[in-house]
Image (spheres, rainbow, N blue to C red):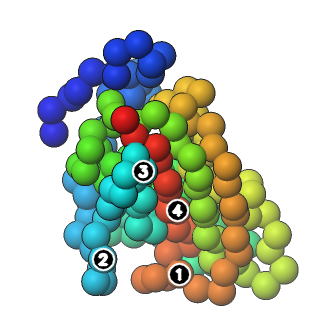
Amino acid sequence: MTTPAPIAGDGAVDAYAKLTELGLTLPTVVAPVGSYVPAVQSGNYVYTSGQLPFVDGKLPQTGKVGAEVSVEEAAGLARLCAINALAAIDALVGLGRIVKIVKVVGFVASAPGFTGQPAVVNGASDLFGAVLGEQGRHARSAVGVAELPLGAPVEVEVIAEVA
């Protein structure tokens, strides 16, 4: 995708430059594993489907957080989910159009008794802040669930306001 410049006069961070500075590259959007699209725009909002931590079309790790997957590993996977969400937004409208990440919902496949979901989803939240600065600060939910698709430890969905 072409790299559009930030919207003039809005104080926007150049997300593409920030990604480069952080040594990150947006991946190709993974084809959906069901009957949905990776992201859809309605008015001034882009809604992503739940993003799994795919790398090159594969899950690098499966299992439940608090059992087979540590909090630190899961936070890294949530970061991958966030990168995949940015890739879905970029493919649809371009990162230069993001005004604000409004809401992030993180789902954590949790072992019985595990209550550290916020620490896991911080991996995604921190990535949005690092790439988008103040525009990346958002409301959030971190939810523990019994299972996620394909055995993924974490899934993240995003609502972004766009110009």
Q: Earlier in the sequence, mark 4 or mark 3?
A: 3
Which label lies toward us, 4 or 3?
Answer: 3
Give me the disc on residue 45: 3
* Residue 15 percent across, percent down from the top left: 39, 28
Gap between marks 4 and 1, in whole Å?
11 Å
Badge 2 local density, few (<14 within 10 Å), some, or many (20+)?
few
* Residue 152 percent across, percent down from the top left: 50, 75
Q: Which of 147 and 44 is in front in this view?
A: 44
Which residue does the image show at 57% across and 46% down from the upper left? 102
* Amino acid on which the number 3 mark rests in the picture: Tyr
The answer to whether residue 31 is visible is yes
Which label lies toward us, 2 or 3?
Answer: 3
Which label lies toward us, 1 or 2?
Answer: 2
Quadrant containing the C terminus is top left
Gap between marks 2 and 4, in whole Å?
15 Å
Q: Name the residue under label 2.
A: 36
120 over 64 or under it: above or below: above
Q: Which of marks 4 and 1 is nearer the N terminus?
A: 1
* Amino acid on which the number 1 mark rests in the picture: Leu
Which residue does the image show at 74% across and 54% down from the upper left? 119
Give me the disc on residue 156: 4
Q: Which of 145 and 14 is in front in this view?
A: 14
Gap between marks 4 and 3, in whole Å?
17 Å
Badge 1 local density, few (<14 within 10 Å), some, or many (20+)?
some
Q: Earlier in the sequence, mark 2 or mark 3?
A: 2
Query: Circle 2 sits in a helix, a strand or a loop, which is it?
Result: loop
Badge 4 local density, few (<14 within 10 Å), some, or many (20+)?
many
* Amino acid on which the number 4 mark rests in the picture: Val
Left or right? Give the position of 109 relative to 50: right
* Residue 153 percent across, percent down from the top left: 56, 72
Gap between marks 1 and 2, in whole Å?
16 Å
* Amino acid on which the number 2 mark rests in the picture: Tyr
